[in-house]
Image (cartoon, coloured by chain):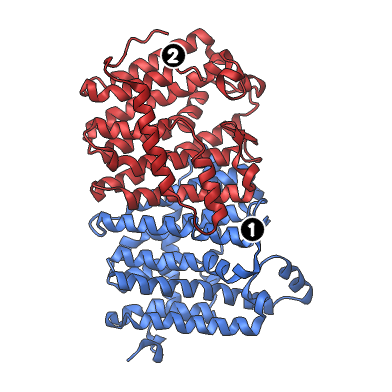
Amino acid sequence: MSVSGNSKSTQFDLKTYWMTLISEINQKLDQAIPIQYPEEIYEAMRYSVLAKRTKRAPPVMCIAACELFGGNRLAAFPTACALEMVHAASLIHDDLPCMDDAPSRRGQPSNHAVYGVDKAILAGDALFPLGFRHIVSNTPSDLVPEPRLLRVIAEIARAVGSTGMAAGQFLDLEGSLNSAEFVQEKKYGEMGECSAVCGGLLAGAEDDEIQRLRRYGRAVGVLYKVIDDVLEAKSMSKEDEENEKKKAKSYVSLYGVEKAVEVAEELRTKAKKELDGFEKYGESVQPLYNFVDYAADRGFSVLELN
Amino acid sequence: QEEQNNPPPSFDFKSYMLQKANSINQALEAAIPIQEPAKIHESMRYSLLAGGKRVRPALCLAACELVGGNDSMAMPAACAVEMIHTMSLIHDDLPCMDNDDLRRGKPTNHIVFGEDVAVLAGDALLAFAFEHIAVSTLNVSSARIVRAVGELAKAIGAEGLVAGQVVDINSEGSSEVDLEKLEFIHIHKTAKLLEGAVVLGAILGGGTDEEVEKLRKYARGIGLLFQVVDDILDVTKSSQELGKTAGKDLVADKVTYPKLLGIEKSREFAEKLNKEAQEQLAGFDPEKAAPLIALANYIAYRQN
């Protein structure tokens, strides 16, 4: 019996699961970046990493993927936090005036608007290595053997690097319409993919399982973004819509809401199909399964949880 | 120049560096091939392969050899250190930072590729440095590689390189920079990455904790030495001799060692740093230590 043909999501409460993890992750991130001399740089790093209204989706997906294979969540917390650090670094740099020139992020002024462009660049430059350092210094060595840690480090570096998120950002800036789907995949799918894969690697999953997580995570990451775009388009006035078309090239601005919703449904099916391969792990697949529905349906508001 | 600590006469520093720079350049060239999207990779390669003396990677390889390792163990780390160094230069040169148009006689990265690509190429080099160590290091236990990753991350983050850059930016045009602050800037901005290069080499080469710590002290010394000598050269040499604008620090009203201590005292300080650094090498086989001794002397007595 396949998981996707079955709606047994009733006994698992994603909202509680997520809420519990968010508060633990926030606490750990808070401890991971203590303020010291020169204070300003730590404040800039904390400003973005600890921003309110962050859903912590990458860490939650990483932990859920680790737990799928019976991994201890204590093994996954440092990597989960690192994902938030490198993600924040990418976003800080994406918002810079020479890039997307975004004045705000998550409802607060963007990093460079508060700390200046020079400090924003340096805050990003410091958050990337802090992520790697956090993993190697804090992952319990009795839970995760070193070869797995090295694979996790390589995976994160690849995801943010010149063929991953940096490539997505570059092609987005270049603005070629041919690459619009590729841009979405790279900018939004990469983080989902990397989060799921890291969780699997930490738990010692087999290579074919890692490949499944890769496809699953990528689909969920893009799905999440497509739905974001759809919701935004629906709540927008005509005037907003015109403005929006001039900047980002989302599925919605390319194909319209209807087709975007279709794409979303395809992604939902695709993601769940990948999870069918994890049948033998029984109920521990539920968080990942419910995550897909959350990305598509937004059954509750994660922001309330914060 | 007096050079009391000459390595054994059998050691030919010039050909040693030539040979190391060659193999480092080959490894760097192979590490980042052109792939899609081509422009980012061209931008990464433009700065990474722009020449440069390869002092940091050479230090990494020499430290590895000193503790009994060979080049294959430390080459990815040596390349990683050079990638980080390059990345910090790309970001440092940006208009919002030092706003430099020229680096090593060539237009800076953002002049050629644009600011957006320069930021991304820097980020990509930073990330790839870690990937390269994690994936390409051969014949070394995973435990040592993990340790090396941690050391590198510490050297370049908010407790290392970035701290130096932040304090440096905040000190610009300030008359309140004292010796302590100047030292903080140099130790973090310059010495931490040199320390990282040497310590990574020692860890990956299989050095004992005691050996690693001795080499760490050596590297800290020559890291600061590097900057003291830079400051001295800026006042005493012409632009032509330096291959970059001389007197830049004076024009920018930057606090330097000659300014705080005077030229003579700065030279004495440099001598002291060099001597103390080389003392850390006393317990090692003199023949194997020859490259690190010569590198220290090179940093102390270079003319540009």
Camera-side residue: A202 or A111?
A: A202
Compared to residue A304, the image places residue B106 above or below, namely above
Name the secondary structure under disc 2.
helix
Compared to residue B222, the image places residue A12 above or below, namely below
Name the secondary structure under disc 1.
strand
Which hue belongs to chain A?
A: blue
Residue A78 in view of the camera? no
Q: Specify whether B126 is left or right of A251.
A: left
Q: Specify whether B44 is left or right of A205.
A: right
Give the residue drawn at x 40%, y 76%: A288
Which hue belongs to chain B?
A: red
Q: Please rate how many residues cluster around mark 2, counting C-alpha atoms within 10 Å: few if below 14, some from 14 to 19, many from 20.
A: some
Q: Which residue is mark 2?
A: B269
Q: Marks 2 and 1: CB-CB under 8 Å?
A: no
Q: Which residue is mark 1?
A: A108
**Which quarter of the picture shows residue A226?**
bottom right
- Amino acid at the residue labelled 2: Phe
Camera-side residue: B273 or A303?
A: B273
Give the residue drawn at x 37%, y 28%: B17
Looking at the picture, how far across and down is residue A270, in whole percent? 45, 82
Looking at the picture, how far across and down is residue A251, in whole percent? 62, 75
Give the residue drawn at x 67%, y 80%: A256
